[in-house]
Image (cartoon, rainbow, N blue to C red):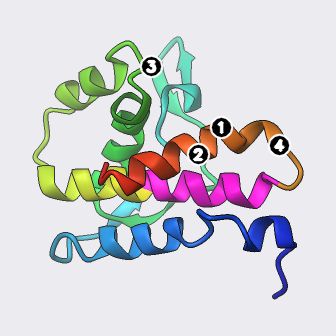
């Protein structure tokens, strides 16, 4: 596959791949289960019967910590979720591995950076958001 030069030649092109590899080896194998894959407040549908998850195209088998990471990553990366993610994590109430959660937050940031790098040729406005994620990943999260 040939990538356009603007994507292939950026200084951050290989950071998402290397970061994902680091995250996947950070903790021992975990039991997999079906996860939503993109669990953030924008995918919660509020109904008369209570909240329901929508937008299931990212569902896959992964450790529980992946969905928990999707909840807390925006706050841990940018600090702009007004504490919602950490409150949701506290309300979860179930057992989870904090080290695996941190690795999944790192992987989630790398996933977002890879997606932004892919979209960058068509949307130059993503450049600053991508640069922020890359710097966060470089700093070790």
Q: Secondary structure at mark 2?
A: helix
Magenta residues, dominant SS class = helix
Q: Which residue is mark 3?
A: 80
Figure check: 89 above or below 29 = above
Marks 1 and 2: CB-CB under 8 Å? yes
Q: Does residue 138 appear to the left or right of 110 in the view shown?
A: left
Residue occupying the point 78% across, 54% down:
119
- Magenta-tinted stretch: 108-120
71 vs 95, nearest the viewer: 71
**Where residue 89 appears, x then y in whole percent?**
24, 31
Residue occupying the point 37% across, 28% down:
75
Q: Secondary structure at mark 1?
A: helix
Residue occupying the point 32% across, 67% down:
23
Counting residues from the start of the chain, the first of labels 2 and 3 encountered is 3
Counting residues from the start of the chain, the first of labels 3 and 4 encountered is 3
Label 3 Cα crowd, 10 Å radius (few <14 / some 14-19 / many 20+): few
Label 1 Cα crowd, 10 Å radius (few <14 / some 14-19 / many 20+): few
Marks 4 and 1: CB-CB under 8 Å? no
The Cα–Cα distance between marks 2 and 3, rounded to whole angstroms, is 17 Å
Q: Does residue 110 appear to the left or right of 10 in the view shown?
A: left
Q: Which residue is mark 1?
A: 128
Q: Which mark is residue 36?
A: none
Q: Which residue is mark 4?
A: 124
**Where residue 29 appears, x then y in whole percent?**
20, 77
Q: Secondary structure at mark 3?
A: loop
Residue occupying the point 40% across, 36% down:
77
Q: Which residue is mark 2?
A: 131
Figure check: 50 above or below 133 = above
Counting residues from the start of the chain, the first of labels 4 and 2 encountered is 4
Quadrant of the drawing holding the N terminus: bottom right
């Amino acid at each position: 596959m040939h990538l356009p030069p603007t994507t292939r030649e950026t200084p951050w092109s290989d950071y998402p791949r290397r970061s994902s590899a680091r995250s996947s080896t950070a903790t021992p194998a975990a039991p997999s289960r079906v996860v939503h894959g993109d669990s953030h407040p924008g995918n919660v549908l509020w109904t008369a019967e209570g909240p329901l998850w929508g937008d299931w195209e990212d569902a896959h088998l992964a450790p529980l910590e992946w969905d928990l990471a999707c909840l807390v990553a925006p706050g841990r990366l940018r600090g702009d979720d007004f504490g919602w993610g950490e409150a949701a994590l506290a309300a979860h109430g179930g057992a989870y591995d904090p080290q695996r959660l941190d690795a999944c937050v790192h992987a989630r940031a790398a996933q977002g950076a890879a997606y932004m790098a892919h979209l960058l040729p068509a949307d130059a406005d993503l450049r600053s958001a991508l640069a922020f994620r890359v710097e966060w990943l470089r700093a070790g999260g």
